[in-house]
Amino acid sequence: MNATVRKAHEDLEALRIRARKIVEEHKTHIPAEEQQALQAISEKATELKTLIANETKLEAARRDLSDLDRYLDEPRHTIPHGVNPDDESRKQFLRAGWEIKGGMIYAPTSIEGTTVRLYDGQKQVVGKQAMYPEEVLFGEIPTDDDKAADYYRKTRAIFSPAYKAAFSKHLQLSVKHRSENMAFTMLSGAEQKALSEGTDTSGGFIVPPDIQAEMLVRLPQKAVMRQYCRVQPTNRDTLRWPAVKGNSGTYNGLSGAHIYSSGFVGSWVGETPAFSDTDASFQTLDIAIKKVRVATKLSNDFVSDAAVNILAWLAMNGAENMALTEDSGFINGDGSALQPMGLTSVGITNVDVEGTTADTISNTTAALGSATKLINVAYQLPAQYVSGARWLMRRTIEGKIRQLVDGSGRFLWPPFTGSGFAAAPADLLGFPVTHSDWMPDDGQDTSPVAFLGDFSHYIIGQRTQITSVVLRERFADTDQIGIILFERIGGSSFNTDAFRGAIC
């Protein structure tokens, strides 16, 4: 803990003591002057807590970068030397700490086995990172799909012992000479050959597999949707996911909502019943793998210092930027040629929560407005999805919900407890609350200000192939280099009945 954080903790404790004293001295009624004092204390406390959170986050990032740098330098964490469809190649992966199970290949990471704090405060033990279906490295090259075949070959090529060294050297030379082309010509013939085997269709070079693993393992720590959705690696441009068409009918009076999650509808029968059950209606959900682009820039001096440092930095900063971009698409994507099918577009059953003020979350002591309607949302979710359900909304929307009052002006779901320094309640109507500023705000007619549901029924298709492109001249006047990262990913819900939307 640095001196700034230590001092902020001391000041926060002093404020807490002052607030408690005011509350204890005025147990039945707090005078207006003391209420103003409490308000000022609360505002200062919020400021200090924000300072502590930011400083703690910065410290953690520095520590993570240092740990990752050391990890990538350790010989025992080298990439397996080459890929061949034989037992010896598999043994090399196992000796390097990789794992093969259930048809999937998992990479070790610098945070494997550690406990990390996720976006909404939950803690999770991080394991190995799922990377490729086993057939990508050890199976036959596809003959029915040229793009898949190219993916297999390039993925195997970047496991070459020379590839990571050539990738790092090329990055350093690109900075030094302000030119990717010149940097490439300065590589040896063997280095050029190794790097060329990892050339992407967009003209960039595929990031070495261990660095990709570090990016992917950090994404759930930064993203909202990845924490709770189902992530499925794929080796094709389209993830074809089996789905079962929901049973037709209504649930709690909502058309299109079903108590049965499929066409398998049963009944109690005798020994020799007449067959009258509904046949299951199977279908497939095709999730197109799209391209996510994130860009950043950094000091040429920093990049020139050490190639390993820049690769470690890319793993951290790249993951943070990808997480933000992913959440934007998985929440608001319209399913067009360039975007995934986000929650706002998949056809979730919506429930009106418009309050006493048009198109907003609101109520008064005379009219409950949004309060009773939010309760409707919670109880319109079919019972089979309740145990894994959670809310997703902007933090400002939760703030408006916490301000809803009963007929006596008391908060229905208080934002704070005690003297105001306790953490906000972890749930709303019995469900955890997760925040994302990509969620729509209120103030617009039929705007989905919140979703309640089991997010494991939204699937994220991931094709493990992150590539990089160096921007040559664009930031030369500021002595910086630009780097673009491309990720292949898509998403959609294979069962929209597991969600309910709250619209204004």
Image: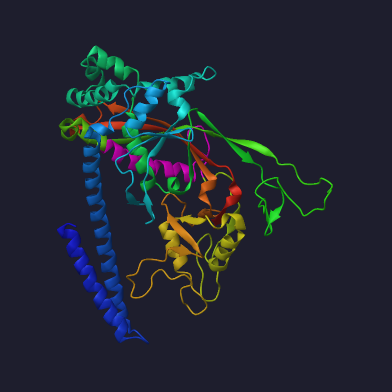
Does 499 lie within the magenta span?
no
Q: Position of residue 424 (x, y in %)?
A: 39, 66
**Magenta region's main secondary structure?**
helix
Q: Please state if 283 lies on the left or on the right of 138 as rendered.
A: right
Residue range in magenta is 313-342
Q: Is residue 371 in view from this perspective? A: yes
Q: Please state if 14 lies on the left or on the right of 402 as rendered.
A: left
Camera-side residue: 62 or 269?
A: 269
Q: Can you name the residue that lies furthest to the top here?
A: 189
Does 316 lie within the magenta span?
yes
Camera-side residue: 257 or 338?
A: 257
The image quadrant that residue 419 belongs to is: bottom left
Residue at (18% x, 62% y) in the render: 6
Q: Please state if 54 lies on the left or on the right of 152 as rendered.
A: left
Q: Position of residue 449 (x, y in %)?
A: 50, 55
The image quadrant that residue 226 belongs to is: top left
Q: Position of residue 65 (x, y in %)?
A: 23, 42
330 relative to 454, above or below: above
Camera-side residue: 197 or 337?
A: 197
Residue at (70% x, 47% y) in the render: 247
Camera-side residue: 497 or 370?
A: 497
